[in-house]
Image (cartoon, grey):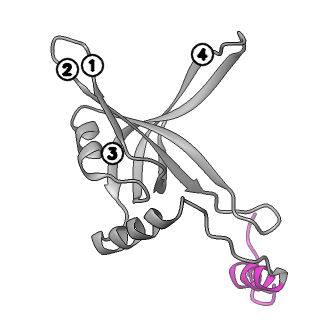
Amino acid sequence: MNKIILMGRLTREPEIKYSQSAQPVAVTKYGLAVRRQFAKQGEPDVDFIECVAFGKAGEFASKYFRKGQLVSVVGKLQMDNWTDQQNVKRITPKVVIEEQHFAESKASSQANEVSNNSASFQPQQTPFVPGEVQAKVNMIVGDGEDDFDLPF
């Protein structure tokens, strides 16, 4: 099974092109900035994922998606193999879109668009506080007093 689900913000405006076949098909590419759930040394990491949508999905993305907008996508992971100018083999992962959805309200999206016009996309950074992390871990895992005997 090859299924990937991501939520993130568009890093650029979607780029639409049409195939050169007898019945042209829309091919839309866009980048997605996806924040990792866990951070190294308290600083959040962001993965930049290339996405491609075909046909009606591509036309939809081109028409309605905008840079900075929060979207969720479902698709399949595909690896593109290519050789660069120095004759080095490269592999680029991309997501071939099967479903795509808005992940925030229109008002939130417009507010984010205004803030993106004044500054480039920057992941939010929060300071690392070890005590807070330990408190959250204790809340999720428990302190051990209420543990039940599990059969495994």
- State if disc 2 and disc 1 touch (CB < 8 Å): yes
Q: Quadrant of residue 88?
A: top right
Q: Marks 3/1: CA distance?
A: 20 Å
Quadrant, the C terminus: bottom right
Q: Quadrant of residue 107?
A: bottom left
Q: Where does residue 132 sit, x and y in percent of width and height?
A: 76, 85
User: Given contact means CB atoms under 8 Å apart, are the residues at marks 2 and 3 in contact?
Assistant: no
Which three-letter amino acid code belongs to the residue tagged 4? Answer: Trp
N-term-proximal mark, 3 vs 4: 4
Query: Marks 2/3: CA distance?
Result: 21 Å
Where does the magenta region start and end? 131-152
Query: Where does the image place residue 85, in percent across and percent down from the top left?
Result: 66, 13
Q: Callout 1, which amino acid? A: Ser
For the residues carrying marks 2 and 3, which lies nearer the camera in this image?
2
Is 151 magenta? The answer is yes
Closer to the camera in the image, 5 or 47: 47
Q: Locate residue 109, reporting x and y percent.
A: 35, 67
Q: Secondary structure at mark 2?
A: loop
Where is 17 relative to 46, above or below?
Answer: above
Label at residue 24: 2
Real-space Cα separation, disc 2 to disc 4, in angstroms: 25 Å
Looking at the image, residue 63 lies above or below residue 122: above
Q: Using the image, tell me which numbered label, if any, was put on residue 99.
A: 3
Left or right side of 113 for 8: right
Residue at numbered disc 1: 19
* Residue situated in front as seen by the camera: 15 or 57: 15
Instruction: Give the Cα distance between marks 3 and 4.
Output: 27 Å
Q: Secondary structure at mark 1?
A: loop
Write down the residue under mark 4: 82
Q: For the residue carrying disc 1, how many other residues have a C-alpha within 10 Å: few (<14), some (14-19), or many (20+)?
A: few
Mark 3 against mark 1, which lies toward the viewer?
Answer: 1
